[in-house]
Image (cartoon, rainbow, N blue to C red):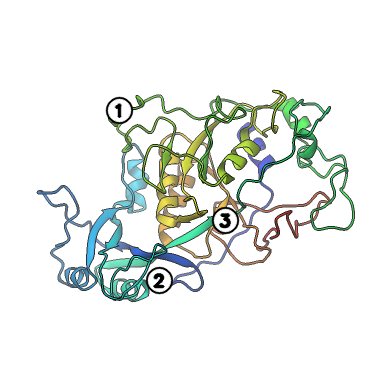
Amino acid sequence: MKTILLSIAIASTIFISPYKNSAVPEHGSYSSNKFFVKTKHDLNISEATGRISLVTGITSLDEKIKKYKISSIKNLFRLNNGSKELFEKYEMSRIYIFNISSISSEGSTDMSGEQFSDFSIDDMVKDFDKDNNVEYSEPVFIGKSAGVREIALKKLFSSVIPDDEMFSRQWYLQNNGSVEPSSGGGSGKIGADIKILNAWDIEKGSDDVIVAILDSGIKDDHPDLRDRIWINKGEIPGNGIDDDQNGYVDDYKGWDFAYDDKRPEDGFGHGTNIATVIGANTNNQIGFAGVDQKCRLMNCKNLSADNTGEYSWWAESIKYATDNGAKIINMSEGGDDYSKVLKTAIDYAVDNGVMVNSAMMNKGDNRDYYPASYKGVFAVGATDTDDKRCRKFSWGGGSCWGK
């Protein structure tokens, strides 16, 4: 109950989107050198290489693999230290990433300008989706964070309790009406906040609660955060061994799913900002006051330095956070496109008793964004200092809304 209390202090509303079933994207962006395939049977692993063989023994699949110049196939999800029951329930072993060979002739082009197959991702997805040995195929969609690059704020003096220097600007914690709405007009509404001082009288948090921040990474030497970062005690840092056998080597302070390494550094600033909102140290005379004064912050970087993230990174990071003890997952990010693969990861987390919070996004429209629109996800919108939907932030945009 205490965990839910603190989570509700962060989130504000829930909505559910109708189910969509389309293999080809309507309006989103997606990777041009890979796509998802869920087969009806597990694919063979080569005894020689230990990798999934490009010769599956299934004629229709082998023909497509050769036609589209598939260079490698890998499992998106691995059981690792997760729930075997749920792993099997959601048939996660049969969800694969098909990677495409780079070629020199004219073909699909990724964001770096590198060319791939002569066929488009749409062509491949449609073809695999029709195969009788495939349950579904879909692009690896790309989403973004809900915010903008971190902007340095002026140092302000505050005499308000707690003594954190920026507390007076955190109107959402205690609103005295002095901060005007960003959309202009009117004035701040006294008491339009989350009543955090009253909440802290009941509960300040617990270091037994792990909140996973799935974002652009966290600056783990930040003075307001450095002693709040989740430490994987089963891992010995720097020895090049997967000590706890969770599938990740030297993940002592989390993992970088965007670049697939042990250094989840913040290349954009957004993740560190989110981490301070949730769990910055309080009453230390610096920075902000976090909503939860004691929780541990698990660093799961799943956005690149340009503020985008592939759904494959998002799905894998959700499973990692779940398997390694997170009680709450925060995803201040979203994509335009419904994905069965991403929904599988969300269902895995929710069935494990994990609370998943996700941004409705801040594009000022009423469209569905994911994962916020999935059933079971606690979708978060933004209100302004006048207790109305935030129609414009200092940098533009505006809170999305919907069912």
Q: In which quarter of the image is the N terminus?
A: top right
Chain-order first, disc 3 or disc 1: 1
Name the spot of residue 73 as percent of width and height, x first: 25, 57
Decide if residue 352 is on the left or right side of residue 207: left
Circle 1: residue type: Asp
Chain-order first, disc 2 or disc 3: 2
State the separation of the CA atoms marked 2 and 3: 20 Å
Residue drawn at (18%, 70%), measured in percent from left and top? 66
- Please tell me whether mark 3 or mark 1 is closer to you in this view: 1
The residue singled out by tag 2 in the image is 23
Crowd tier of the residue under label 3, counting other residues whose Cα lies within 10 Å: few below 14, some 14–19, many 20 or above: many
Say if 53 sits above or below 351 in the image.
Answer: below
Name the spot of residue 241 as percent of width and height, x first: 27, 30
Circle 3: residue type: Ala
> Disc number at residue 243?
1
Q: Quadrant of the C terminus?
A: bottom right
The residue singled out by tag 3 in the image is 372
Say if 134 sits above or below 214 in the image.
Answer: below
Quarter of the rendering containing residue 146:
bottom right
Say if 215 sits above or below 221 in the image.
Answer: below
